[in-house]
């Protein structure tokens, strides 16, 4: 404990000594000294080890260890602020839209300006009104929700098992950042998901007691989730109905009466979700997009991910390494939870199972079904961790219950079991932290100021062609209530090398009247050591020679340059 505390002290001293970034940098983590990362990972690993050892000797050191782990994560979540990033999120990042909605609330003073997800946007707005700078409010929210997720998982395991000492297993199982990049940003679909352990605990308390207090708590959390994100609200409906159904099946298999929750709880969530979201343009657009893809026979998310992996200029070994880096932490939990779940199913069939383990296994199965549905059927979301988030939460819950069961074994067998499971948690924690800040989503002041110039001073009816700045940047710059927000000006998909080829010797010949914007990200991001030489040859959008050719092009006039963002005006092609 003393060593971990000293490591956290040294990491904090190094954290505050790091200066601001001079411009766009390909890696956030590389800007911090090796000693900082040695201390960070040492504190993380030592905290996990101390938590598990405290379960063996019955000491209370786990409280100090979890406090050190959270303090360690506090530094980790505020790394972009230490480097002076304007925002951690750029390009097509959803956070640009969410901060734009926050700006809309602050500009108008009304929640209605918060668009689709008023809960998150109102929360961030309140932080700003209480004195937190908008530039740092995102880090406060993302850390607070991660901390709440870890602590509430401990409470859930304690409630599920009915044993006070098992709170430790929930805490340690939830410590790794298994959601990686989705925990180091503010995305409503994940912030609302981090409430699930608490909702599960409340539902279990209500199932056992039928208490109006827990019913009221469920209503508060349920309605809160509705205003956080529609898909998470849908997950909550699935959770209620599947919990009720599980009660009937489990009682039938065990040949005994089992307390159940009422399926009518779903009617608190489902109508509220429908009434709130049905009138938004975004809802109609999403439905039209889904139906249109189904009717046109578009590729499923699973097929798209497989095609992307197959087309990547990587060897099999490099693909496996990428999988380990991006999804290794999830793989650890899914494998262990899946194997334990199979054993629980065997016990259920032998009629000697425990309700909490059987319930968690059933929910793990529900999560697997939802993940498969999202991968097989186009439902807008593509990223594997995003579509499997319900499954991952239940895998963490099941992992914690396995730890709790292991603690009941004979001392020698218990110690071996905890050591093996603890090693899995350590591996997941290291991999999760390693993946949480890649790719670097730094938004520079130059990119923001350049976008502000072209969106306010430029011609409002002209497209702005770029390689990596999407229309979401307009939400961030303008705010959600700006009348010029739609239709968007920013357009990605600028031709490689600005479109110069054997036919088009000028950009004026390649494009009609337009703006062309470039910035430092285009030239340096794919030069990072993470990318192989083959990837760089494919992904770098233009060379220095192409930029020099654009500078000398008589059909392109450079109208803005702040050192990190350049803007050219291409007049109408009269030919």
Image (cartoon, rainbow, N blue to C red):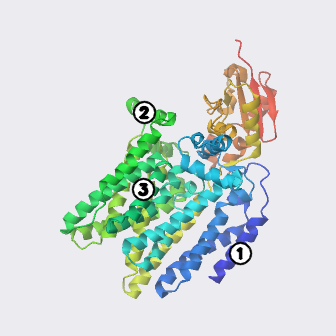
Q: Closest to the observer: 263 or 46?
A: 263
In the figure, is residue 528 to the left or right of 254?
right
Can you say which quadrant of the picture contains the C terminus? top right
Dot 2 surroundings within 10 Å: few (below 14), some, or many (20 or more)? some
Dot 1 or dot 3: first in sequence order is: 1
Q: Which residue is mark 2?
A: 293
**CB under 8 Å between callouts 1 and 2?**
no
Can you say which quadrant of the picture contains the N terminus? bottom right
Whether residue 335 is visible to the viewer of this picture, yes or no, is no
- Residue drawn where x is 76% and y is 65% of the image: 16
Judged by depth in the image, the label closer to the viewer, 1 or 3, is: 3
Q: Which residue is mark 3?
A: 219
Judged by depth in the image, the label closer to the viewer, 3 or 2, is: 3
Q: Which residue is mark 1?
A: 9
Dot 3 surroundings within 10 Å: few (below 14), some, or many (20 or more)? some
Residue at disc 1, secondary structure: helix
């Amino acid at each position: 404990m003393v060593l971990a505390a000293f490591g956290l002290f040294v990491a904090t001293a190094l954290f505050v000594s790091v200066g601001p970034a001079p411009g766009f940098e390909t890696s956030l983590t590389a800007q911090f000294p090796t000693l900082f990362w040695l201390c960070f990972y040492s504190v993380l690993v030592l905290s996990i080890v101390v938590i598990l050892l405290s379960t063996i000797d019955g000491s209370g050191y786990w409280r100090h260890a979890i406090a050190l782990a959270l303090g360690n994560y506090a530094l980790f979540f505020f790394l972009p602020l230490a480097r002076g990033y304007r925002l951690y999120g750029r390009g097509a990042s959803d956070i640009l839209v969410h901060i734009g909605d926050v700006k809309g609330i602050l500009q108008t003073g009304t929640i209605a300006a918060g668009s689709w997800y008023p809960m998150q946007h109102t929360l961030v707005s309140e932080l700003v009104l209480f004195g937190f700078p908008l530039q740092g409010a995102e880090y406060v929210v993302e850390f607070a929700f991660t901390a709440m997720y870890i602590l509430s998982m401990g409470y859930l395991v304690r409630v599920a098992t009915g044993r006070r000492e098992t709170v430790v297993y929930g805490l340690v199982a939830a410590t790794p950042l298994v959601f990686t990049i989705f925990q180091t940003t503010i995305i409503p679909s994940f912030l609302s998901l981090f409430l699930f352990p608490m909702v599960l605990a409340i539902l279990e308390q209500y199932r056992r007691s039928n208490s109006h207090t827990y019913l009221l708590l469920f209503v508060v959390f349920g309605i809160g989730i509705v205003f956080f994100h529609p898909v998470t609200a849908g997950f909550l409906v699935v959770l209620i109905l599947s919990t009720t159904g599980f009660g009937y099946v489990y009682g039938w298999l065990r040949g005994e009466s089992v307390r159940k929750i009422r399926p009518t709880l779903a009617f608190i969530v489902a109508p509220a979700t429908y009434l709130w979201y049905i009138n938004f343009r975004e809802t109609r657009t999403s439905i039209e997009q889904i139906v249109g893809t189904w009717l046109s026979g578009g590729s499923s998310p699973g097929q798209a991910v497989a095609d992307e992996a197959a087309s990547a200029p990587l060897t099999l070994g490099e693909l496996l390494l990428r999988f380990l880096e991006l999804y290794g932490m999830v793989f650890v939990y899914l494998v262990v939870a899946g194997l334990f779940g199979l054993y629980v199913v065997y016990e259920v069939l032998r009629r000697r199972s425990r309700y909490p383990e059987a319930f968690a296994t059933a929910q793990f199965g529900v999560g697997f079904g939802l993940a498969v549905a999202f991968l097989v059927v186009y439902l807008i979301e593509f990223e594997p961790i995003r579509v499997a988030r319900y499954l991952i939460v239940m895998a963490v819950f099941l992992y914690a219950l396995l730890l709790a069961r292991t603690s009941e074994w004979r001392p020698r067998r218990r110690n071996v079991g905890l050591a093996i499971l603890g090693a899995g948690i350590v591996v997941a924690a290291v991999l999760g932290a390693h993946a949480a800040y890649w790719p670097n989503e730094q938004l520079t002041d130059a990119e923001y100021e350049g976008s502000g110039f072209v969106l306010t001073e430029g011609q409002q009816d002209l497209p702005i062609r770029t390689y990596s700045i999407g229309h979401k940047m307009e939400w961030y710059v303008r705010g959600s209530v700006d009348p010029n927000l739609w239709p968007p000006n920013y357009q990605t998909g600028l031709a490689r090398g600005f479109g110069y080829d054997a036919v088009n010797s000028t950009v004026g010949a390649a494009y009609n009247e337009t703006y062309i914007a470039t910035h430092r990200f285009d030239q340096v991001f794919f030069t990072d050591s993470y990318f192989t030489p083959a990837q760089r040859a494919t992904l770098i959008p233009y060379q220095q020679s192409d930029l020099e050719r654009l500078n000398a092009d008589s059909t392109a006039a450079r109208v803005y340059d702040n050192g990190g963002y350049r803007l050219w005006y291409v007049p109408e092609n009269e030919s």
